[in-house]
Amino acid sequence: MTETRDWGNTEFRQALHEVLPLYPKLWKLLSRISPFHFFTLKGTMVISAFFTPAIIWGTKFVVDGVVEALNNDLSWLVTLIPVALILGLWVAQMLVGAIQGIVMQIYGTLVDIKSRGLLLEKAASLDLAFFESPRFYDKLHHAERERWALTSVHESTLNLVGQLITVTSLFAILTTLHPLAILVLVITMIPNVVIEVVYIKLWYKLDSETVREWRMADYMTHLVVSREAAKEVRTYSLKDYLVSKFKKNVAFYFSTFQKHSIKETALMSGANLLGYLGIGVIWLYAVYEAVNGRISIGDFTMITLATEQVRSGLLNLVSSVVYTVADALTLTWYFQFIEFNPDSVTGALDKRKPTAKLVTENPVASIEFRGVSFSYPDTDKLILDGISFRIKPNKKLAIVGENGAGKTTLIKLLTRLYDPSKGNILLNGQDLRDYDQNELRDSMSIVFQDFARYDVSVEDNIGWGRVNMMDNKDLIRQAAIDGGAHSSIEALSSGYETILGRTFEEGVDLSGGEWQNIAIARAFFADRPLLILDEPSAALDAFNEQALYERIMKLGTSKTVVFISHRFSTVRMADEIVVVDNGKIVEQGSHYELMKIDGKYRHMFSRQASRYVD
């Protein structure tokens, strides 16, 4: 369900005030996408607007020609020229309409592609703080959902201008009968216009008031049909409950919709009777004028045709204005996102100009946390409080602690997904913020706890770790071997060409451990001097975990490794261990050094070891 503005409280003038500044942006964007298609549509729109008045005007000459031929015993050939003219107009109208349809279809596709590309470029440029803030992430959601309005508003505006030209031309035709004919038509149409505007506002107000119910109904639908929830929906017999929740959430909308629809139809029927009365008055006057010889039979025919066209045209014009404004209001979401200042989000990264360069010989010579504190954006809770420690060059550092101690947050800061609230993180003696962000991240291979599962081929899943080397199948294979994924890949029907996941029909899903091995292989394929692993073996059994860490430790002096693990059998392999508790470092040292202390590490190690002792 599309989110709408509350038209019950928002006056039309206010809506126009919000929408009008949007048009220069819209026209600028659309004209840049394809100037040829953009201006072709404008030209065909103007031409098309004159066809109906021209055909009605031509009909007058055909009828007058027939009457003259009957009265003066002339050949029917006197009507040949006006008939040919009307036929020519019909053919031209068909051709212009065909051209307009083709151009509109092609242009609509171009707008869809380009507008989505702009959205992707903008989204990719935003910091993680944007995606972890529901308020700002909603901007992306709305922008993607309302992107359709780019084409809709453009086309409806063209139609609106075309209708205005057509109606204005028809007005000119009606003045040949009497200037007051237009006044009669407009006055008798006022009830139609009022009802149209009132009910457009009412429908938008109803949508606005029930948007939460529709979202909940959509969520209930998602739970019933989604693969992720399918097992529990059946295990807990949730089907009837979820379906009843869906029905309950849409019941209010349906009952109100039904009541308003019936009332609107009744009122509009009455208004139509008044409108037809106005047409009848004009026709009677036209008959009177024709009988008295003040207008020709052709004029009479032209006026009767124009009268109904003006009435329907005016009604369409009113509807078009309101609906175009309404669509344009939804389009503001798209431009708000495209023009969004990423620095306005609390927690956005420092955009200072880079002043430091990573050295080629040893780009990760040392890493140091110096008095680092951190709170997530829009919260006051300290996740990290005065953290200080140093990672020696080409050493293996393990970070341990209870759940919620702040371990993963350390990784997010180290990879500069966030900047510290206080303190500094130094790489080779320089603050991380002094390095070019892309250059900095190109020095790191990372396996996050919530790693991505890409529904593409196995080869791409691994190769995306270093896209400029994706063609090197030998390196991909070696990364899979080092990451422990090779044997399970070989067992797949198409090996490294197998499509993973369930997005595509031919996709094959993997177990949690197999997916984790793929993510580890991707990090290995990236082959960067700093390897960061956040619970990389959470889905692996003890045997495969041990094998993985043995391979990691064999990296020797070629890489600096930072990893988080809850399994102390692997933690003990690290050169250095940092123990985090409630956002602070409480202990630091090697396994043997920490075991000598009757502290947090020894208690955690002993508690886990006791599970394996009879």
Image (cartoon, rainbow, N blue to C red):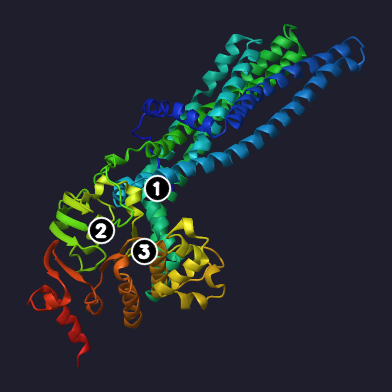
At x 22%, y 58%, the residue is 367
**Label 2 belongs to which residue?**
365
**Label 3 belongs to which residue?**
451
**Label 1 belongs to which residue?**
124
Residue 38 image position (x, y, % from top left): 58, 30
Horizontal side, residue 103 vs residue 481: left or right: right
Give the quarter of the figure containing the C terminus.
Answer: bottom left
Q: What residue type is labelled 1?
A: Ala
Q: Is residue 198 above or below residue 69?
A: below
Element carrying mark 1: helix
- Residue nearest the observer in this picture, 484 or 245: 484
Q: Residues within 10 Å of mark 1 (few under 14, many from 20)?
A: few
Q: How crowded is mark 3: few (under 14 residues within 10 Å), some or many (20 or more)?
A: some
* Mark 1–mark 2 CB contact (< 8 Å): no
Q: Distance between the Cα atoms at labels 3 and 1? A: 17 Å
Q: In this view, does 237 lie above or below 613?
A: above
Element carrying mark 2: loop
Horizontal side, residue 564 vs residue 190: left or right: left
